[in-house]
Image (cartoon, coloured by chain):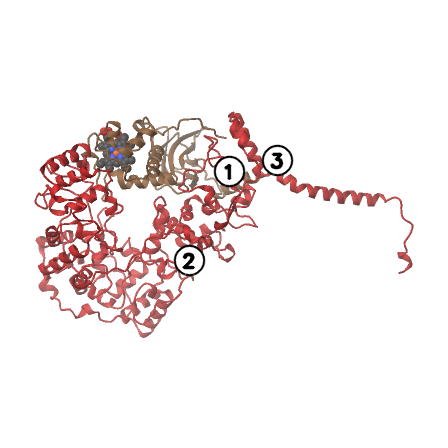
Amino acid sequence: MKRLGLLIFAAALLLAGCRHSSPQTPKPAAYGTQITEVSGGKQLAQVGSPLPQPLVLQVNGADGNPVTGALVTFHGDGVQFTPAQALTDSSGQVTVEAQLGYNPGDYQVTAETPKSGGGAASMSLREIALGYEQTVGRMLNDKYCIRCHDPESTPERVSNLDNLSPAPHQFTDGATLNRISDADLTNMIAHGGPALNKSPQMPAYGATLKPAEIKAMLSYIRTIADPPYQTPGVKYGK
Amino acid sequence: MDDNNKPGPLRSRPTLRELAYFGGVSLVLLVSLAIAPAKNYFSDWRHYQKSYLKIAAERQSGTLVRSFHGGIRQTWIAKLGVVDRCESCHVNMNGALVGATAQPFRKHPPIPHEIDQFGCVTCHRGQGPATSVEEAHYTTEAWEQPLLPAKYLESGCGQCHLGPLEGAPKLSEGRNLLSSMGCVHCHNVSQPDGNQLTPGDNPPPLTHIAEKTSREWIYAWIKNPQAYAASASMPNFLLNDQDAADISAFLMAQSTPSAASKVKIKPVAAASPSGADAATEATTLYGASFCSSCHAVQNEAGNLVGGNFGPELTRVGNKVNPDWLRRWLNNPAAYHPDTRMPHYRMDDKQVALLSTFLLAKKDNDLLANVHLSPSTADSVAHGKKLVTEAGCAACHQINGVNPPQNFAPDLTRVGSRALAQVVFAPGMKHNLPDYIAAKIHDPRSFGPGLKMPKFTLTDSQTDALATALLAQTDRAATYPKELIISGARPSNYHPGGDAGKLMDDLRCLSCHAINGNGGDMAPDLTWEGSAVQRAWLEEFLKNPNTLRPALIRRMPKFNLNPREIKTLADYISVAYQGPGFDSQTLDTHSLNADSAARGKQLFYSKYGCQSCHIADYKNDKGYVGPALTSVGTRLTPVWTYKWLKDPNALRAGTLMPNFGLKDEEARDLTAFLMTLKAKQGGGK
């Protein structure tokens, strides 16, 4: 009685959850010993939106060969999968679409496949949801920064990275950027390379971007860092 | 009164039964009286507030605990019609309790507005006044407004921000699609400021279609437009064979000769070049005319290469009649007066080369199985009936069929449509976002007799469209005017005089904007006269070479004659002048060798301009911005100076950063840049 609200809430969640999972669990026709990522990890999507590419995972047997008909189950706090459970196809792979939740930041996706003797093999993927601030950051990055900071070219946009020395880092490069403080990054974006005694080939954006935009840029860089950026301070879960 | 009801002696004692009744009734009364306080006591918000205080206390945050005000918390914003009690449970929206990651105690992620000025339901929907988790978030019997799924959140922004909005890419994409997919040909979508969204596609008139194509092609196309061109925006009307055959019969029958048909052209044989040389020459011409800036062709890997401003040309050889194509290349406006395609001044040989090249783009299987029985008066009449009913004339001009009025439901307030008015398809979830998305994704799932055709959209395009439509709310329509931020509306500027006629013939405004009217594919020309030197302009019009080797979209060569070039150059240099480009802003006498030497130093050392620009092909490699090797012959000194001081003021949205240069730095850099006079086309 005391937790009436909670109960209703939980029941509603359960119901909502049930609607998304397929009514019947498919029966595994075979069992593997190992599950690996083929593609789909470390993607970016706006909060509540589907990831641009599906998750593709492969189940292998003890001999290292792909296993057909193995059951793979997906979990992830706040993540919706279609389908949430599937059997591997003839090449030992499953393909599912995933939609991230309401909150910006990291989502952990776990895929699990039962082993024949009991127990399960599992693996985790990291996916990243962008909130308003990171979305603004991403748009600014795509407009101003990406040509110099991303080695990849597209038909619309040729990378300029090779023309620069020292070469700038990609914003996903957590190993490097996580070590630079918020203040220093902000300073570098606002006042250019020379602000930190670095190359003037990094232009100053302080007169082009508003302070809120620089903050958004910083938030984007922090959010997509790989390995993830740890905010200083403690986290309280439940 | 009769005996039975005579008042008897007062009974001193109630019977047992009566006592039991009385007791029962009082108990019921007591319990029912207690329900309200109990419900209150056990309410969700009380529970959450207690756990919040517990966490705060555990973390020894005495100030948080002491400053906490319990009870129902309400945000009331009369002018927005907001009464929100969400913060009764979501007590930590401002993040005072640092690091709480579980709901309802999460900090609200940063947004550009103060929450207490806009409330929660403005963006998230849900039931603001509700005080239970269930009623606030979900659809219940009494409430029909559940929380908006996060993927549609940007629709909240779109209630006030009516134009493109940074940080809301989905909303902006959705609005673009409403226009570019042509939704607004049939549906009215008006914004709270009265702006009516207008179509951004340019469906061809069908009044002369028999000149352009065959009945077989029309049949195949209307059966499945995407089988002909994967990128086609024309929707699929899911016609059966008979109906498609009759429509094609009618369209051929209503066709009348166009102005173009009167133009004499060389007979095909005489003008047709052949051989390997001709093929190379044609490919070069296709490239040099920058056809691919607007038209895409599928390459062998199946990828579309080229722009989407004009129709895809992968199988154009299946579609067009050779004579029509030659006349079209000769002058498109003679066939379609409102076409966006420029009038290239091609000679007979060029027309022949290009048409042969294009006619070879075909797929022999496309029409192989189309065998239509000859059209009859009946089939034509039936075709006309179908065309009228399907609303084809809402997009296309058709002889004998008037554009339908109010053909499809008005979507101006669709984001607030009451669920009671909505007819759901079987098995659908009963909420508005799902309904709108399903209508966009598969309209015929609501019934095979419905008229709305099926568009070819990706899931993310469907989400974007639904987001844009969910922004069309009752709430927005009643917001105070000062909250509404209108989008830019195109002006109706058109250049005048002889130059104006010429610019219209060349369709300059298809790509360039001038004085608020025109496309965004190429630079805005409003101040072009202030920006470039006259001699350069003439040279460029004669032989446009791109300033940015890395760009796909480029200015095509129109084969203008010297008189046309002079007319254009005169007009542009006189009419397209901006304010403040005079000697008061920059005294050109100060641009001497010393100044240039200092400028060179600034260019290479202090500002590292070579990371994006090439001033000297030998040493520099940057190609984010245009090459500057001959900028001294291209730009005027005063434009250069003002540009360096504040690029965004001259061209909003430019990539070039504002470096906050001091006046003398900008002057020195200008002096240096004006010394760069390499012969044009030094690059590629």
Q: How much space separates mark 3 and mark 2, taking CA atoms? A: 46 Å
Q: The chain shown in red is which? A: B
Q: In this image, B650 relative to A43: left or right?
A: left
The answer for which chain carries disc 2 is B
Q: In this image, B82 relative to B633: left or right?
A: right
Residue at mark 2:
B411
State which quadrant residue B70 falls in: top right
Secondary structure of the residue carrying tag 1 is: loop
State which quadrant residue B390 falls in: bottom left
Q: Nearer the viewer, residue B163 or B186?
A: B163
Residue at mark 3:
A2
Residue B398 point in image, percent of width and height = 30, 68
State which quadrant residue B684 falls in: top left
> Could you tell me which residue is drawn at 51 percent across and 39 percent down?
B87
Same chain shared by disc 3 and disc 2: no
Residue B673 point in image, percent of width and height = 13, 41
Classed neighbour count for the residue bearing mark 2: other residues with Cα under 10 Å, few (<14), some (14–19), many (≥20): some
Q: Quadrant of the N terminus of chain A?
A: top right
Secondary structure of the residue carrying tag 2 is: loop
Let me know if residue A170 appears in the view. Answer: no
Classed neighbour count for the residue bearing mark 3: other residues with Cα under 10 Å, few (<14), some (14–19), many (≥20): few
Which amino acid lies under the numbered mark 2 shown in the image of this protein?
A: Leu
Q: Which mark is residue B90?
A: 1
Q: Nearer the viewer, residue A116 or B560?
A: B560
Badge nearest the viewer, 3 or 1: 1
Secondary structure of the residue carrying tag 3 is: loop
Q: In this image, B458 relative to A77: left or right?
A: left
